[in-house]
Image (cartoon, grey):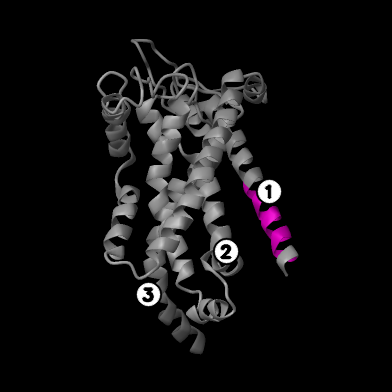
Amino acid sequence: MFQMRRWREQLPGIGFTLPSLLLTLVFGVYPIFWAMRYMFYDYKGYGQERFVGLSNFTQLFHDQTYWDSVVNTFIYAGGKLILTLPLSLVLAVILNRGLRGKHLLRAIYFMPTIVSTSVISIVFFIIFNSFNGILNQFLLRFHIIDKAIDWLGPEHAMLSVIIIAVWGAVGNYMLLFIAGLQNIPNDVYESASLDGANAVHKFWYITIPMLGPVLQMVVMLAIINSLKGYESIMVLTEGGPIGKTEVMFLYVYKQFFPIATSGSSVEQQIGYGSAVGFVTALIVGVVTLLYFYASKRMNKVYE
């Protein structure tokens, strides 16, 4: 009787979680196993599938375009992390103080996070346009440059997409840092002030150490999101010019959903795309595990 009562009490919770569980299984778990099956097939999304064993992985091993995209991904992720994390932390420290209008400023900095990536990319395309872009017009008017810069050309395309990524991510990580800062007791800062500590000392010896758990979580999220990011690149450059902004997940996307340019026809590669996606997921997983390992070693050092 008691077991029956406990079961009835749990029914509402099961009812609420069941739809989410079913959606996760159908749209999250099932596609993974579906793609893992096709890693060993030559299947183009139509017609007959043909078992090819490890041929897709052999092709991937010799696919220079993919390995170039891996290098580009780490350049993109590294540039984004180096700029985003310090900027987010500095903004969080500033906006965590008793500034007038700080709530409005937080909302303004967070706004890019909730705006569609496609919309952001189109806006920045107008800004970075080589012929009549807002940025070039501004720099030319104030005589900072002598001629228009091709911001989406081979030399500057990666820098441009990194700037867009930083602009879109700063607000999100800033709020996470603010949440962590608000958990640090003011008494600690007051005691440090009595001992003669200045603002720099408080930041390095109080804020950073006590923000450690939040900092580790933010860095992990930033690494994963940076390695996975491709949406703005797809809208702005489609991985070009000449592959300078081709990243791993954009390359995977192109295998499943080919992007035809200049009237050319590109063939869909479901089987090969599944193999590329599997290897890409492994790379991201290895990087994440290395970060977890490094985080644990750092925790032991500080303990």
**What is the magenta range?**
288-300
Near mark 2 (Cα within 10 A), the count class, few <14, some 14-19 or many ≥20, is some
Instruction: Please name the residue shown 57% across and 75% down the image.
Output: 196
Q: Which residue is mark 3?
A: 12
Q: Is residue 132 left or right of residue 57?
A: left
Q: Secondary structure at mark 2?
A: helix
Q: Are marks 1 and 2 in contact (CB under 8 Å)?
A: no
Residue that numbered label 2 is attached to? 208
Among all residues in the image, which is located at the extreme front?
196
Rendered image quadrant of residue 75: top right
Secondary structure mostly seen in the magenta stretch: helix
200 with respect to 176 (left or right): right
| Mark 2 touches mark 3? (CB < 8 Å) | no
Label 2 – label 3 distance at C-alpha: 43 Å
**Amino acid type indicated by mark 3:** Pro
Would you say residue 293 sits in the magenta stretch?
A: yes
Residue at x 42%, y 40% (from the top left corner) = 165
Q: Nearer the viewer, residue 20 or 158?
A: 158
Query: Residue at the location (50% across, 51% down)?
Result: 85
Residue nearer the viewer, 78 or 271? 78
Q: Kindly identify which numbered label has been placed on residue 290.
A: 1
Query: Is residue 128 one of those drawn in magenta?
Result: no
In front: 131, or 169? 131
Residue 34 visible? The answer is no
Q: Is residue 263 above or below residue 217?
A: above
Q: Position of residue 293 (x, y in %)?
A: 70, 54
Q: Distance from label 3 to label 1 (Cα)?
A: 40 Å
Give the image location of residue 241, x and y in percent: 44, 18
Badge 1 marks a residue whose secondary structure is helix
Please tell me which of labels 1 and 2 falls first in the chain.
Answer: 2
